[in-house]
Amino acid sequence: KAHGGEAIGITEPVPLYMTEAAGLVNKTPEDFSEAIEEGDDVSPKVLRDTLALYQDKKVAALVYNSQTSGPQTEKVADAAKSAGVPEVPVTETLPKGEDYLTWMGATIDSLADALGK
């Protein structure tokens, strides 16, 4: 929990168990992440508010589901890239050929690297 209280952004709720256990604070509007999880469009205001997190550098990392994407999540990823905010890919399912501990360990290592350990 070296980064406890640090702000992050997400594209959908997939990483929340991990990030909350690490003491990180999700700043993404719930309306954004829930809509993305459900496959729904996000309102223009919610998208603007979400993009502002990256443009204004209010989050230390973007933790995103690499197994799904769409125009709105791509805009968020582009905003993170443009602002120099590190991106941390996560997956919903165990990658083929990996065991659970290796998979989670690699994800945690990626997050720690993005946050500068």
Image: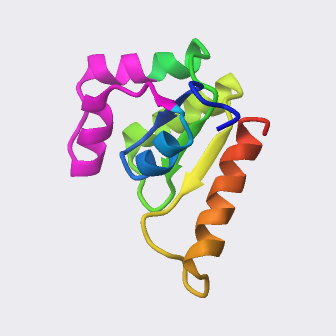
Q: Is residue 111 left or right of residue 10?
A: right
Residue depicted at x 70% and y 34%? 2
What predominant SS class does the magenta segment belong to?
helix
Q: Is residue 85 left or right of residue 91?
A: right
Residue depicted at x 62% and y 47%? 88
Residue depicted at x 42% and y 45%? 16
Question: Taking 77 as reference, is 64 above or below it?
Answer: below
User: 93 or 46: which is nearer to us?
Assistant: 93
Residue depicted at x 61% and y 73%? 101
Tell me the quadrant of the picture where the C terminus can be found.
Answer: top right
Question: Taking 44 as reference, is 16 above or below it?
Answer: below
User: 5 or 70: which is nearer to us?
Assistant: 5
Residue 106 figure quarter: bottom right
Q: Position of residue 37 (x, y in %)?
A: 28, 49
Colour basis: rainbow
Instruction: Give the magenta-colored segment's residue range.
Output: 25-50
Q: Please tell me whether residue 51 belongs to the stretch shown in magenta.
A: no
Question: Taking 80 as reference, is 68 above or below it?
Answer: below
User: 36 or 95: which is nearer to us?
Assistant: 95
Q: Please tell me whether residue 34 belongs to the stretch shown in magenta.
A: yes
User: 25 or 90: which is nearer to us?
Assistant: 25
Q: Position of residue 15 (x, y in %)?
A: 46, 50
